[in-house]
Amino acid sequence: MALFYSGPSLAVLHDEYAARGRIDPRAQLVSSSSTVVDAPPERVWEVMADLASWPSWASGIEILRLGEVRPGAPFRWKLGGITLRSRFAVVDAGRELTWSGVFLLFKAVDRHLLEPMAGGRTKVTVEESLAGPLLPLLYSRARLHAGHERWLSDLAAACARSGG
């Protein structure tokens, strides 16, 4: 792992990776987590794609600026007090929500994939790549993974509260 790897430019990361449903496999931090939610993909999507509601159910999230949830649209948010500038790359209702983002010198791709399962349930997978100079000295894969696990747990609980 290269301590000084900064990944492709944000434009390339967005267009060639995020918009094509890919994360940066060379990034210093790459993580993937999945859970099964007891709700159909349409309901999970309804909760997940309503970013304005995230602060009401997701730990440590604040939405600062949000327009339409569509490919190319920007949004600004805070995660654990850190401000992120993101842009939607894939908005495929009931299937995938992906964006690219940047904070400080670090660049990320976040993918959220929904897969229908028997019994009206949904497998939700979160994949993320995070790259930037000296990143491994400041953040770990374990911490990134723990954040994904928390997000998935919060999402599942929000879907359950909304009637599954």
Image (spheres, rainbow, N blue to C red):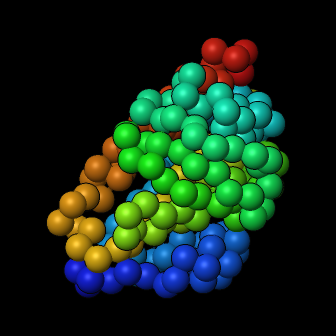
Total numbered labels: 0
Q: Which residue reaches farthest left?
A: 137
Q: Position of residue 93 (x, y in %)?
A: 82, 48
**Residue 102 drawn above or below residue 77:** below
Seen at 48% across and 35% down, the residue is 61
Quarter residue 26 falls in? bottom left
Please report the residue visible at 35 percent of the width from the left and 74 percent of the height from the top: 132
Q: Nearer the viewer, residue 150 or 4?
A: 4
Residue at (55, 28) in percent of width and height: 55
> From this viewpoint, is residue 144 visible?
yes
Q: Is residue 90 left or right of residue 65?
A: right
Q: Quadrant of residue 54?
A: top right
Q: Position of residue 58 (x, y in %)?
A: 51, 30
Split into 4 quadrants, where in the image is the N terminus? bottom left
Residue 49 appears at what percent x and percent y? 72, 41
Looking at the image, is 37 positioned above or below residue 18?
Answer: above
| Quadrant (top left/top right/bottom left/bottom right) for the C terminus | top right
Q: Considering only vertical position in the picture, is 152 above or below 130?
A: above
Residue nearer the viewer, 108 or 102: 102
Indicate the quadrant where residue 80 lies.
top left
Q: Position of residue 5 (x, y in %)?
A: 33, 83
- Residue 55 lies left or right of residue 135; in this view the side is right
Location of residue 86 with respect to 79 vertically, above or below: below
Rendered residue at 38%/64% (across/down): 104
- Is residue 40 visible in the rendered structure shown here? no
Residue 144 shown left or right of residue 151 in the figure:
left
**Quick one: 139 or 45, which is closer to the camera?**
139
In the displayed structure image, the side of residue 8 where residue 39 appears, left or right? right
